[in-house]
Image (cartoon, rainbow, N blue to C red):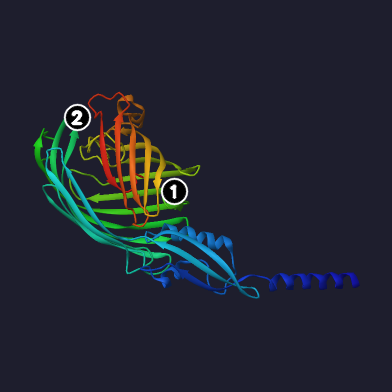
Amino acid sequence: MKFKNSLFFLFFIVSTIIFSQEKVVLDIKIKGAKKIKKAFITKLLETKKESSLDSLSLDRDIILLKRLPAISHAYYQVFHSHKNFYNVFINIEENFTLIPQVNIWTTTNNQFSYKLGLYDYNFLGRNITFGGFYQNNGFDSYGVNFKAPNLFSKKWGLALNHQNWKSEEPLYFGDKTANYLYNNISFEVLGLYQINLRNQLNFGVNFFNEKYQYLSGATDPSVPQNLDLDKKLLKLVYTYDALEYHYQYIKGFKSVLYTQFVTSNNPFQNDFYIAWNDFFYYKRIKEKGNWANRLRFGLSSNEKTPFAPFALDNNVNLRGVGIIVDRGTGSLVWNTEYRHTVLENKWLTIQSNIFSDIGSWRNPGGELNDFFESKNLMVYSGLGLRFMSKKIYNATFRIDYGFRVSNNPGQSKGGLVFGLGQYF
């Protein structure tokens, strides 16, 4: 009996000592915040005042903060206050987030085109994206976008988008090509739900009107020269994000699944679905290297139509192939590149890169084995440069030259591709 009492007493003493030594957060201090609200940052943190001091929670908080457009870098420090109480300092380096957009280009018919926009990616200091653009490519287009991931709480947000888009686009049917004026007027409402640090859902509805007007090229009795369609699009996007950022360097895995169902009350186009998944993998290579990969696989309703949704395009999948050179009802693309930092200072980073873009398509009305047909397999490789600001969000100017590796007659032999932001 004495032995049992002694054992209980010893257990009590040890437990008391351990409990009394538990580290507790006395206060959280945010350093370096200028435009972004300190109260907003505190709301997002997993670490709270009077909670247990947990390094794993702090690590997750830093990962979350680095993903915000307003923050280019973040780290924490822990200082002892008294007894078992500690102060936590969250140190952040802010990005400049009021970003103008200026793009100038010429279309295939030598039309001078430009796009002007202005977006704030930290509107009101609360991680809200708000802005719009005007574009003239021979036709007037505009868009207004609002996205507030934490509008209602840490987990719930809202996105609202309106767009009136016009462009001259080629449509393909057999060996024939026609140019149409495409006009899309849309209103979209999305709910944003952050399940946890790695998992997120976006879901909602888009009401839009599509118009196609024949301009030039081949005609076919089965392809109307004018269409005016009212449609409804139901959207669900699931994101798994395990990426970690250190300025321009990224490591980890990310997956984004896009699913859409479009309904339309017209005799020419049936209801259809479209879904695709982007898989991203990034790996740090020694001190200055970064290996980046994107694998995209997508399918849609397989109707034999010139309005197939997956486009083969310079700015989307294969650098050097040209602007909307073909369409399909399925897409399988792997983009891989090695990025190497050749110059870096406090404000600017210059990266070189070498890349390969490999893609295959399912023809409208075709079979899954279209992906394995040599005539549908295209490979472009090349070199590029990145000029990146370390103080302005997404301020990356990229230039790539891609040349054709695969033997596909009729396709572009290669060309320059310009853009803002990393290709993926």
Q: Residue at left 38%, top 35%?
A: 354
Whether residue 108 is visible here, answered yes or no, is yes
Quadrant where the N terminus is found in the figure: bottom right
Residue position marked by numbered label 2 in the rendering: 174
| In the image, residue 136 above or below residue 110 | below
Q: Position of residue 258 (x, y in %)?
A: 36, 49
Q: Residue at left 36%, top 53%?
A: 236
| In the image, residue 192 above or below residue 311 | below
Whether residue 195 is visible here, answered yes or no, is no
The mark lying in front, picked from 1 and 2, is 1
Disc 2 residue type (three-letter): Gly
Q: Position of residue 318 (x, y in %)?
A: 31, 36
Q: Quadrant of residue 419?
A: top left
Q: Residue at left 58%, top 69%?
A: 79
CA separation, marks 1 and 2?
Answer: 44 Å
User: Helix, strand, or loop for circle 2?
Assistant: loop
Q: Which of these two is toward me, 281 or 97?
A: 97
Disc 1 residue type (three-letter): Tyr
Q: Quadrant of residue 390?
A: bottom left
Left or right side of 382 for 250: right
Q: Position of residue 415 (x, y in %)?
A: 25, 34
Rendered image: mark on residue 249: 1
User: Helix, strand, or loop for circle 1?
Assistant: strand
| In the image, residue 136 above or below residue 52 | above
Left or right side of 35 for 224: left
Q: Label 2: few (<14), some or many (≥20) within 10 Å?
A: few
Q: Position of residue 339 (x, y in %)?
A: 40, 41
Looking at the image, tell me whether mark 1 or mark 2 is earlier in sequence order: 2
Q: Label 1: few (<14), some or many (≥20) within 10 Å?
A: many
